[in-house]
Image (cartoon, rainbow, N blue to C red):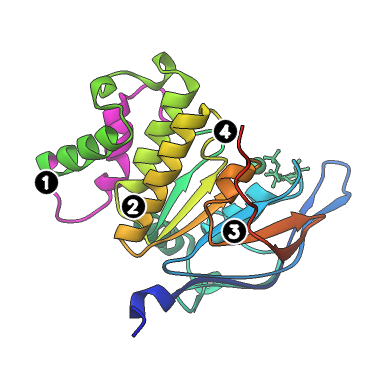
Amino acid sequence: MQDERSTEELVALVGVTRTVVLPDDQELHILRGINLRVHSGDHTAIIGRSGCGKSTLLNLLGLLDLPTTGELTFQGEPVKKLRSNARATLRGSAVGFVFQQFNLLPGRSALDNVITPLLYAKGRDFWKRRDLAMDMLDRVGLSHRAQTRPTMLSGGEQQRVAIARALVRKPRLILADEPTGALDVDTGQAVMTLLDTVATESGAALVTITHDVNVAALARSCFRLDQGVLSPTAVPSVVHA
Ligand SMILES: Nc1ncnc2c1ncn2[C@@H]1O[C@H](COP(=O)(O)OP(=O)(O)OP(=O)(O)O)[C@@H](O)[C@H]1O
Ligand SMILES: [Mg+2]
């Protein structure tokens, strides 16, 4: 029998559009009628050219933005019915974001950055939070840099701190925007394996945006975004350097 958790629908987009109004009053139709369902246990890659709307789509999946039209549901609940603080609470407990630009707090140590998502979790004392964060920093190979500020870390190290921060609360939905963009091939493979392992351990879903076919090759399903339209496509094969 299939594990019940693996079939739970986490997030669904039905006929979703996202349009923004530019300073000259022109409308930019970034996403046009997107249909996508993400279930626990999924590992999905989304590929597409720069500027095609991938980050915009990920922001919707992660409840950072709302659709212009169409239906967005999270665990079956329509998101537009939630007040913005309820949406933020749900996002904080259920979604782990690895942002394309990392979005680390520059004035805080690597460890403090990884602890941040745990500050909003109930019932965890300081040392437990610190241990969880240290353990996650260790898993991305950075426990020796725990007290270092992000501005003193390399781009790849900052990316690994961002990944530790996204995973530390064991979210149901992990959204990774170019998670290997700043990493060399070997570190990139190690980080993708970590993302996949943590997702599998906790029965979470992993959605990865990537330009890298070798990263997309690790996914179990793949979609291509082109001119605001999302279509299923074959998972690419690994390309050897
Ligand atoms: N709030 C906004 N206002 C105006 N334009 C926007 C806004 N958000 C996104 N865009 C535009 O929409 C398009 C899609 O942006 P998005 O960041 O989703 O692309 P992307 O596929 O993630 O690109 P990349 O691969 O380069 O990261 C871009 O042309 C971007 O300039
Ligand atoms: Mg982007």
Q: CA distance from mark 1 to mark 2?
A: 23 Å
Q: Is mark 1 within 8 Å of ligand 2?
A: no
Q: Is residue 238 left or right of residue 34?
A: left
Q: What amino acid is found at the position of numbered circle 3 in the picture?
A: Leu
Check disc 2 and report its element: helix, strand or loop: helix
Residue at the spot x=57%, y=40% of the render? 178
- Position of 164 relative to 144 (above/below): below
Are the residues flagged by discs 1 and 2 in contact, CB closer than 8 Å? no
Going from the N terminus, do you reach mark 1 or mark 2 first?
Answer: 1
- The residue nearer to you, when weighing 28 against 84, is 28
Image position, residue 91 (x, y; %): 42, 58
What residue would you read off at disc 1?
125
Q: Which mark is residue 115?
A: none
Front residue (pair 56, 52): 52
What's the residue type where badge 4 is placed? Gly
Is residue 112 located in the magenta-colored stretch of the structure? Answer: yes
Residue 181 badge: 4
For the residues bearing labels 1 and 4, Cβ distance under 8 angstroms: no
Task: Where is residue 9? Give x, y as percent.
Answer: 47, 75
Residue 154 lies left or right of residue 128; in this view the side is: right
Q: CA distance from mark 3 to mark 1?
A: 32 Å
Magenta span includes 87? no
Residue 7 in which image quadrant? bottom left
- Relative depth, front residue between 47 and 153: 47
Left or right of 64 on screen, residue 19: right
Q: CA distance from mark 4 to mark 3?
A: 21 Å
| Among numbered discs 4 and 2, the one appearing first in the sequence | 4
Distance between mark 3 and mark 2 Cα atoms: 23 Å
Quadrant of image for the C terminus:
top right
Q: Quadrant of residue 72?
A: bottom right
